[in-house]
Amino acid sequence: MSTKVCLLIRVSSEKQDTKRQEIELTGFCKEKRFKIIRTISSKISGTKNDRPDLIELFEAAKRKEFKKVVVTEINRLGRKAKDIRHTIDRLHDQKISIVFKNFAGLESLDENNNETFVTNIIISIHAELAQEERKLISERTKSGLVAARKRGEILGRPKGKEKRNVFLKKHQKLIVDLKKGLTLRQCAKLHRVCRNTVIKVKRAI
């Protein structure tokens, strides 16, 4: 008899697509002869509290709808080590194992529904790595913003207090080149601003 499973799919933003994960996990389950009972797919940051996808997962787990939860990798459960551990513990309380497709199909519980020492260590290490990866992404983003400000780039929308003519005055040379017919990319490179700034100037002319 096929083992009933739930697919847990997550991407961090609306711009990202969940299809790749779904295709990968569906193929994996077919190879393992798992029966997919439910697919929970969401576009939400792994750092958010009260995630709707996890609430749905825990409620379905209480109803014993499936025996395993299948994910591509551990950071689909979350980005903070303590949150990942909490999710794993909640599922283990219901005797539900988590299968990590990208860890060669590693399962969080053995055939007797017990955590093995080796599996526990591997999960703990990767949970910490997921958290550190989140920190590095945050630091790189902040560093990029600082560098952009130093180059004089305008980030986000022009401030409400800044009138249109003041904004355009800052980019007079850029306006001249736009009127000459230079492309957005050429203008951005020539004036050392981001492409979005060039677009804003063009719209404001």
Image (spheres, rainbow, N blue to C red):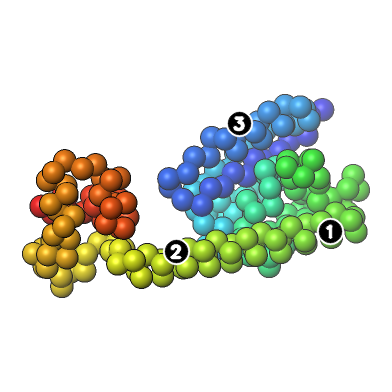
Locate residue 193 relative to residue 11 in the image: left or right.
left
Looking at the rendering, which quadrant does residue 162 occupy? bottom left
Q: Type of residue at label 1?
A: Asn
The nearer-to-camera label among 1 and 2 is 2
Residue at x-position 15% and y-position 73%: 161
Check disc 2 and report the residue beneath it. Answer: 144
Quadrant assignment for the N terminus: top right
Check disc 1 and report the residue beneath it. Answer: 120
Mark 1 or mark 2: whose residue is earlier in sequence? 1
- Please say if 8 is above or below 30: below
Q: Type of residue at label 2?
A: Gly
Residue at x-position 24% and y-position 52%: 198
Q: Of residues 145 and 102, which is closer to you in this image?
A: 145
Residue located farthest toward the bottom when viewing the structure as drawn: 161
Mark 1 or mark 3: whose residue is earlier in sequence? 3
- Please say if 54 is above or below 104: below
Q: Of residues 100 and 39, which is closer to you in this image?
A: 100
Mark 2 surroundings: few (<14), some (14-19) or many (≥20) residues within 10 A: few
